[in-house]
Image (tube, rainbow, N blue to C red):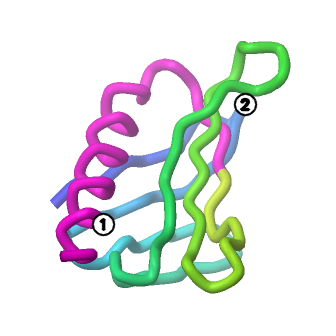
Amino acid sequence: MIEVKFSNPDFQLGILVFDGNVLEFFHLRESNRWRVELLDSVNIKLDEKGKKHYLTVKNKIGHDEVIGLFFGPEILPQVNQLVSELQKAMETSKA
């Protein structure tokens, strides 16, 4: 199980938890769950200025962005691990 806390007030607050099958997102105003089979893509991007990291998760229905979070470099290793595990699970679910 991977848990990443987005707790830097200069960016955004929230918690992402992935157990290998379900990605959960907890935020002050909402929480959501998605089975890995329903996800289309997960990526880390940089903003236009190349300074802020941005995590994006899109679903298979309409390819809508279901998660979009800016985060600081201090949690980049954790986010990289989350993205890697999600991508592996997404590939496995296609088989």
**Element carrying mark 2:** loop
Question: Residue 70 in the image: x percent, y percent?
Answer: 66, 39
Identity, as a three-letter code, of the amino acid under mark 2? Asp
User: What residue is shown with label 2?
Assistant: 10
Residue 93 versus residue 95: which sits nearer the camera? 95
Residue for point 37% across, 71% down: 23
Q: State if disc 1 and disc 2 touch (CB < 8 Å).
A: no
Determine if the magenta segment contains residue 62: no
Work out whether 35 lies above or below 69: below
Percent coordinates x, y for residue 2 in the rendering: 23, 54
Q: In this view, does 21 lie above or below 40?
A: below
Mark 1, residue position = 90
Left or right, 86 with reference to 68: left
Instruction: Indicate which disc, 2 or 1, sits on the residue closer to the N terminus.
Output: 2
- Indicate yes or no whether the magenta region holds residue 91: yes
* Disc 2 to disc 1, C-alpha distance: 31 Å
Q: Closer to the camera: disc 2 or disc 1?
A: 1
In the rendered view, would you say 86 is above or below 72? below
Residue sitting at 42 percent across and 60 percent down?
A: 16
What are the residue bounds of the magenta stretch? Answer: 69-95
- Residue at the far front in the pictured view: 95
Would residue 84 appear left or right of 64 to someone viewing this image? left
Q: Residue at x 64, y 79 (%)?
A: 30
Q: Which residue lies furthest to the top in this view?
A: 50
Q: How crowded is mark 1: few (under 14 residues within 10 Å), some or many (20 or more)?
A: many
Residue at 73% in and 14% down: 50
* The N terminus sits in image quarter: bottom left
Q: What is the secondary structure assignment of the residue under circle 1?
A: helix
Identity, as a three-letter code, of the amino acid under mark 1: Met
Left or right: 35, with 29 as reference point:
left
Q: Look at the magenta stretch and give its main secondary structure.
A: helix
